[in-house]
Image: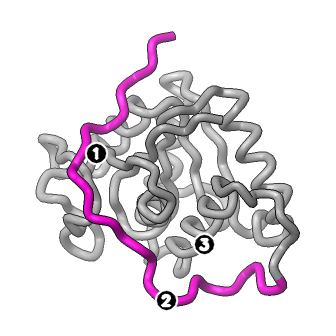
Amino acid sequence: MALARIISGGQTGADRGGLDAAIALGIPHGGWCPKGRRAEDGTIPQTYALRETASETYEVRTRHNVIAADGTVLFTRGAPTGGSRLTAEFAHERGKPLLHLDLQEVDARPAEARRRFVSWLAEHRIRTLNVAGSRESLAPGIRAAVARFLMQALSADAFAPEPEHVGAELSGPLPVAAETPAAPGTKRPR
């Protein structure tokens, strides 16, 4: 698998978990965010190399990220609702690969979920991955859970035996790296 970039919209929760994992793993990151770097907690930190759309609406950046990616992984706890459901609809509209991972099921079978994710990346030849899903306010702890899942799934030890405390929170702050903003992924010709 040759994942080249992780993108997201920078919202609290799953979006930032995807960007945090990219930074921690040294994978280039980017994506589109609303004008003014708008998010539910105020302004998206400059740590994340995101480009602003011309609109302040979340719908516009969601559509941009679905289009810019080769595929989208959608993390929720339970069925997708609100913006997560809209992300799935946009992916289906555009014929883009979409993998929904319900973290309640991931927690029950983490190694199986990682294998499913890595197989999906390979099957669809995903080079630019859009990470989307629930906001932190709707699913407390989802940012850390998504970052942990992606770091484990995309590391060389993706299929190592499970640690004793699979559900344990990440210890300490997530690592961040200063990097020059890069343009979001480009659409791969088909």
Mark count = 3
Residue 53 placement: quadrant = top left
Label 2 crowd bin: few (<14), some (14–19), many (20+), radius 10 Å: few
Applied colour scheme: one colour
Residue at 33% in and 47% down: 30
Task: For the N terminus, give its image quadrant.
Answer: top right
Which amino acid, by three-letter code, is at mark 3? Ala
Name the secondary structure under disc 1: strand
Above-or-below relation of 131 to 24: above
Q: Which residue is mark 3?
A: 145
Q: Say whether disc 1 or disc 3 marks the residue closer to the N-terminus.
A: 1
**Residue 2 placed where, x, y %?**
59, 35
Asked if residue 129 lies left or right of residue 166, the reply is left
**Residue 33 placed where, x, y %?**
26, 51
Task: Report the mark closest to the observer, 2 or 3.
Answer: 2
Above-or-below relation of 14 to 85: below
Above-or-below relation of 39 to 120: below
Task: Confirm whether the magenta stretch covers residue 176.
Answer: yes
On residue 172, which mark appears?
2
